[in-house]
Image (cartoon, rainbow, N blue to C red):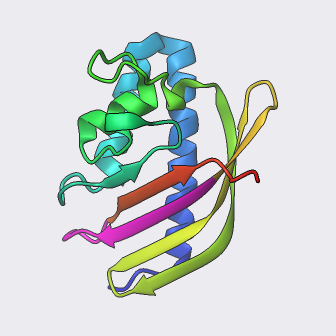
Amino acid sequence: MPITSTELADARQAWGDALIAISKAFEADGIDGARAVAEGVLDSAYGYNLGPVLFKPTLASGDQTFRPTREGALSYFVGHDAEYPLDGGFGIKGWRSMTSETAAEFIEGDVGMWMGWISLTDKDGQVTKVDKSFGYKKDADGVLRIVLHHSSLPYKP
């Protein structure tokens, strides 16, 4: 079954809702609560069951710029991992809302790609806007999985 634009939009919103859930779990239950929610997100939304995920987080650098493993992604979202000492936990920064603006999308059968801007608002009302690309593939059960996640801060000349 081919991917639809609506499925891409729903997957993007689900990703934003999950990020907010990680933040709220951290505030309510500390790192263990945040880690449990983040692990659920990684297992339900990302395609680590299909192979490496091409994940380039916004705030990652050096030898750990790219995170093709579930462990690397988990550390990026919740931090607190000695293997990734620079990770501050992007998912535990008090996020409260997410909006997206589409620049373009490409769909071919069971593969879909989206790029645009994601704006995240934290509990203090501060907005962070990032350039984002997501690539999705439907798995054997018809579940849309993130197989590419690239994020960067906008270029400022």
Could you tell me if residue 79 is visible in this image?
yes
Taking the spot 68% from the left edge, 52% from the top edge, the residue there is 154
Identify the main secondary structure in magenta.
Answer: strand
Is residue 69 a member of the stretch shown in magenta?
Answer: no
Q: Quadrant of the N terminus?
A: bottom left
> Please, is residue 145 above or below residue 61 in the view?
below
Locate residue 79, reporting x and y percent.
Answer: 41, 22
Locate residue 118, reporting x and y percent.
Answer: 65, 54
Taking the spot 76% from the left edge, 53% from the top edge, the residue there is 157
Q: Residue furthest right?
A: 125
Taking the spot 33% from the left edge, 43% from the top edge, the residue there is 42
Quarter-wise, where is residue 2 in the image? bottom left
Taking the spot 37% from the left edge, 24% from the top edge, the residue there is 35
Is residue 134 a member of the stretch shown in magenta?
Answer: yes
Left or right of 40 in this view: 11? right
Along the viewing direction, whichever of 23 and 62 lies nearer the viewer: 62
The magenta stretch is 131-143
> Please, is residue 123 above or below residue 157 in the view?
above
Left or right of 133 in this view: 96? right
Along the viewing direction, whichever of 120 and 60 lies nearer the viewer: 60
Could you tell me if residue 46 is visible in this image?
no
Locate residue 70, reporting x and y percent.
Answer: 26, 40
Locate residue 82, reporting x and y percent.
Answer: 29, 15
Q: Residue furthest front?
A: 157
